[in-house]
């Protein structure tokens, strides 16, 4: 069971179950995420991370399942690729679907927030990968979502750009205060960004770890490495990439 901080839950699941035929992908998950809480989701490939994100986004209408699922109507999803429309200029991508006379002004303000003021008329092909992801963030946050779902949004970026995007995401979340679920394979990214880290294993929550570190966080902090080691061990990885002892025992059993 994964339970939030005691604040009002924006996301609430009870006995959430999803499967394909006889294969169960999510097993009776109980999860709460509070407004303003940043939760990272780790797990091996095939553990059910993307299935859970799609369920919370209500994009899994074709997947059989059961259980209670409560999510806000105002939600946004950021994917690994920016999914910008190549035939639309940057501002038009940001305000896609918005109505009202103030849409363009809101879009410009969102672009300014992500450091792209003045690029409103650019085409997506004229932007770097990092800039395209900034546009994707602006497109999400211009709608003031109560829930932001992020599916490895920085996985395709180079290391330096990723560092900048981490700082930007933290700043944007501190200002807008959505509930956030970040799906990632990067343990360091999870410890750096999250208030709480969930580890999904075979469709169940195996670990629900609060990250009790002040911000900004630093990789050189011994406490950072403590959490990193705990989470790596829960994923079956020990020092220097070696299997953790408990992982070997699990395989032998």
Image (cartoon, rainbow, N blue to C red):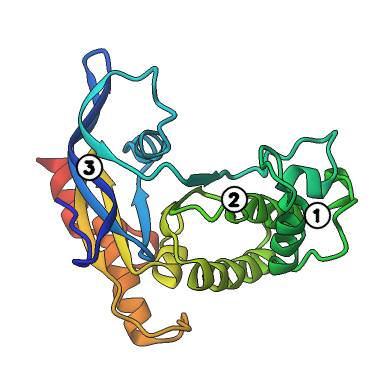
| Relative image position of residue 194 (x, y in whole percent) | 39, 67
Task: Name the quadrant containing residue 112.
Answer: bottom right
Q: Residue at x 29, y 63 (%)?
A: 231
Q: Compared to 246, does 36 lie above or below?
A: below
- Helix, strand or loop status at disc 3: strand
Residue 140, label in figure: 2
Q: Which residue is mark 3?
A: 13
Distance Cα–Cα, label 3 vs label 1: 38 Å
- In the image shown, does 151 or 95 lie closer to the viewer? 95
- Helix, strand or loop status at disc 1: loop
Q: Residue at x 26, y 13 (%)?
A: 21
Sequence order check, earlier mark of 2 and 3: 3
Q: Compared to 80, does 160 lie above or below?
A: below
Q: Nearer the viewer, mark 3 or mark 1?
A: 3
Image quarter where the C terminus lies is top left
- In the image shown, does 23 or 177 lie closer to the viewer? 177
């Amino acid at each position: 069971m994964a339970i939030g901080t005691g604040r009002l839950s924006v996301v609430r699941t009870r006995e959430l179950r999803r499967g394909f035929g006889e294969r169960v992908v999510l097993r009776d998950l109980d999860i709460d995420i509070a407004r303003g809480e940043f939760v990272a989701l780790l797990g091996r490939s095939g553990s059910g991370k993307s299935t859970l994100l799609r369920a919370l986004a209500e994009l899994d209408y074709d997947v059989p399942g059961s259980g209670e699922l409560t999510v806000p109507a105002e939600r946004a999803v950021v994917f690994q690729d920016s999914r910008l429309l190549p035939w639309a200029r940057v501002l038009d991508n940001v305000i896609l679907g918005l109505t009202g006379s103030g849409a363009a002004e809101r879009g410009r303000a969102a672009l300014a927030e992500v450091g792209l003021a003045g690029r409103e008329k650019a085409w997506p092909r004229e932007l770097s990968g990092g800039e395209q992801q900034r546009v994707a963030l602006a497109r999400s946050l211009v709608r003031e979502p109560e829930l932001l779902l992020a599916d490895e949004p920085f996985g395709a970026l180079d290391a330096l750009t990723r560092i900048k995007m981490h700082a930007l995401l933290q700043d944007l979340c501190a200002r807008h205060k959505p509930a956030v679920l970040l799906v990632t394979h990067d343990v360091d990214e999870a410890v750096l960004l999250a208030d709480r880290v969930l580890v999904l294993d075979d469709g169940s929550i195996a670990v629900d770890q609060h990250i009790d570190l002040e911000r900004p966080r630093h990789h050189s902090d011994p406490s950072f490495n403590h959490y990193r080691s705990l989470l790596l061990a829960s994923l079956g990885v020990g020092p220097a990439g070696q299997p953790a002892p408990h992982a070997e025992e699990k395989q032998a059993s």
